[in-house]
Amino acid sequence: MAKKSTNSSNLKPRAPVSDKLNIGNEMRCFDLKDRAFYDSLTEEERKKFSPYLMIRWGSAVEGSADLQKFYVIATNERLNKHFFAVNRHPKLQWLMATSVSPGLGAQRHNWIAPKKKESSNSARRKFLSEIYPNLKNSDLDTLCAVMTNDEYNQLLRDHGVDK
């Protein structure tokens, strides 16, 4: 007996990921300076292509310290510097990305996650900066990190601040 499909009508099928847009393939094209890569994408693929990922993936490679240093410096100089000035030109962004590689073949690239923004405008930090105006930002950060809630509440009471 044939098995009935249990797919619900409200579930959308996953769109197939183009092999061209696989990050491994993109990084291979990046390292091999494939300047025709962007032109080879269909309109649909171009909509899904993210030149920004070239900064995140492209700047970090496995290998010698010299190779790693080269990729970071080259990415900063050739890609980061003017990347967002040409944000309406993804082909130009791709061409800029292909200039990063030293031409040593395909490398193993690693993802670099963006730094998480910490809440620098927290009430605690703001209060501490008001009562300690001469502290550097790094000192304020340290004080916020090591101060317990009880200590902070006592400091508020000492300064006559109602919660």
Image (cartoon, rainbow, N blue to C red):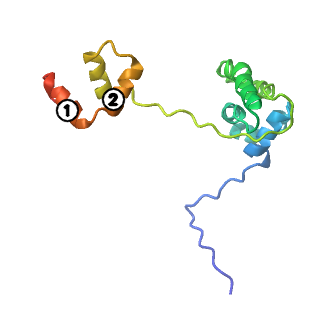
Tag 2: Cα neighbours inside 10 Å, few (<14), some, or many (≥20)? some
Q: Which residue is label 1 attached to?
A: 153
Tag 1: Cα neighbours inside 10 Å, few (<14), some, or many (≥20)? some
* Position in image of residue 52 (x %, y %): 66, 31
133 up-or-down from 114: above or below? above
140 up-or-down from 6: above or below? above
In which image quadrant can residue 34 be found? top right
In which image quadrant can residue 129 be found? top left
Asked whether 110 or 139 is in front, the reply is 139
* Residue closest to the far front: 65
Q: Are marks 1 and 2 in contact (CB under 8 Å)?
A: no
Q: Which residue is label 2 attached to?
A: 144
Q: Earlier in the sequence, mark 1 or mark 2?
A: 2
- What's the CA distance linking mark 1 and mark 2? 13 Å
* Position in image of residue 153 (x %, y %): 19, 32
Q: Residue at x 68, y 40 (%)?
A: 110
* Position in image of residue 137 (x %, y %): 40, 19
The amino acid marked with disc number 1 is: Asn
In which image quadrant can residue 69 be found? top right
* Position in image of residue 83 (x %, y %): 68, 22
The amino acid marked with disc number 2 is: Cys
Mark 2 lies on a secondary structure that is helix
Q: Residue at x 69, y 36 (%)?
A: 57
Disc number for residue 127 = none
The answer to whether residue 42 is visible is: no
Q: Quadrant of the C terminus?
A: top left
Q: Quadrant of the N terminus?
A: bottom right
